[in-house]
Amino acid sequence: MSLSTDDVKRIAHLARIRVDEAEAAHYQTQLNGIFRLIEEMQAVDTAGIEPMAHARDLQQRLREDAVSEADRREAFQAIAPQVEAGLYLVPKVIE
Amino acid sequence: MNASLEQLADLLAQGKASSVELCQDYLDRIERHNPRLNAFITVDRERTLAEAADADARRAAGQAGRLTGVPIAHKDIFCAEGWPTTCGSRMLANFVSPYDAHVISQFKAAGMPCLGKTNMDEFAMGSSNETSWFGPVKNPWDARAVPGGSSGGAAAAVAARLCPAATGTDTGGSIRQPAALTGITGLKPTYGVVSRYGMIAFASSLDQGGPMAPSAADCALLMNVMAGFDARDSTSLERAPEDYARDLAQPLKGLRIGLPREFFGEGMAPDVAQAIQAALAEYRRLGAETVEVSLPNMDLSVPVYYVLAPAEASSNLSRYDGVRYGYRAAEYRDLLDMYEKTRADGFGAEVKRRIMIGTYVLSHGYYDAYYIQAQKIRRLIAQDFVEAFKACDVIMGPTAPTTAFDLGAKVADPVQMYLSDIYTIAVNLAGLPGMSIPCGFGADSRPIGLQIIGDYFAEARMLNVAHQYQLATGWHTMLPEGL
């Protein structure tokens, strides 16, 4: 498997990371090197092996559906790039 | 300056020093040596001394615990209220945490003042501390060498005794490898033993916090503070509290040490091999026996890790969008443009590479071939350890294949950088506890670490195994010149 620069640009777009042509070519070389390493996995017969999603086979804990956090809107919004009247501001999305 | 946590606690208990005096001494050392080492991202003398004064007041009121007043440095991945918490990234360079990580609140409850936030690879992605937005850390043993990573600042700070101890995190070796490369002791606990709440996420199924300090006895005391159930981390394990120092004094007679064939092959440098063999000889003198074991799938741990960790990272790091906190690009046309520019400028090259790998392996058409295949091999790797532990109590081998490499040596080739974690990654995939203890020096006079891997929840036993070696040897007490 080998990624083209178009593949790299598509992946970057999915990841919401801007890349220009020169960067795409640079990432293409590096990512293909990493994927050559990753390809070593393909030689392994894993038929019948259950995927291991977590470090331990954990049971998810459940808790009461009750409010556990205090309202700290001011503290949290004080570190936001742009807020107004308790709202996070972003560029206009809907005309 | 080479005082253990026990000795510092005694000084405070006997009234021979106050926490304010201790913190001033360490802050002075940081001021003198940090410009050269770059081990700390944030130092805040006033804040530290206020915390120290609180600890002294607590002691005066008769409410001190064993470690109250003993200072500690925290890796800048742990959110600490009122402190900048950058995770080594431009993305969070202006982020002042509005809350405390569980680990931070545990150390606060113990009355241990924070000496500062230590440097690290950006979002803990790196093995040399060269991906930090705040610049590389220098190895105190040799300024031309890296300290390892990602907890490189913590390791360098402890090695140079700019702090008596530090916290670290380990996703693929980020506590053990820098501990080895700087000649200190570091422990990655069993997954789920230390809460991840408020510890900035990289790969959630692998990330685990742990202690870094000169000795195993220090690490045991720190584990008593850090470990324990926390309902705010959904993977925190509900277990009764334990005293990690309880077995330190146990003799090692009859200990069965497993030596995986795969750890002792061609990849290990001759000077590292020599130091490891000498350490094993010391263990035999102490009454342990060695048996050969096998981890046949170990070579696959690096490829598996570089599917799973980036996959989890691409999901975890999607939260950095320039909307609620952190960096936002200065100029943008619309929302999409804002996201793309914010993430292009806010993340460094290594983080972007891993997000792209993760995005690709999770994308339609590739999920089964990469992500699911990696999860299946992860199980094979975990099963190898189950088999190996039938024949031994602990596993030993090198922590890293070489001593610390030179700054810049592996920056241009990510794959070479990734392979420096060949001996540590399998432990994270299996969720097992692992540690590194100093066991000698290489041909270049840079430190070498012995890795000790235990079965699930065997931390107290591992600390005992490490401590008995440290009673018989002096590697962990050696200090770099000029400090």
Image (cartoon, coloured by chain):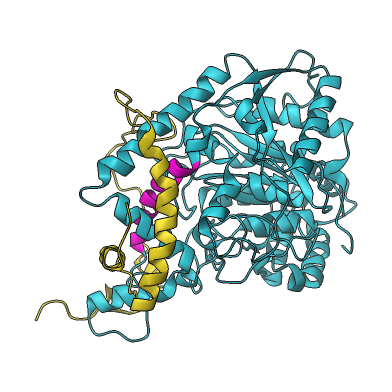
Q: How many marks?
A: 0
Query: How far from the left and from the top, in percent, is residue B341?
Result: 34, 77
Query: How far from the left and from the top, in percent, is residue B482?
Result: 89, 64
The dominant secondary structure in magenta is: helix
Q: Colour of chain B?
A: cyan
Is residue B471 on the magenta stretch? no
Identify which residue, B64 or A10, lies in the foreground.
Answer: A10
> Residue A15: which quarter of the image?
bottom left
Q: Which chain is yellow?
A: A
Give the residue displayed 76% in from the left and 71% down from the top: B36
Identify which residue, B320 or B11, lies in the foreground.
Answer: B320
On screen, residue B393 above or below B446: above
Query: How far from the left and from the top, in percent, is residue B461?
Result: 68, 25
Query: How far from the left and from the top, in percent, is residue B44?
Result: 67, 70
Q: Magenta span covers which residues?
A: B302-319
Q: Is residue B243 visible?
A: no
> Residue A93: which quarter of the image?
bottom left
> Residue B399: which quarter of the image?
top right
On screen, residue B236 above or below B21: above
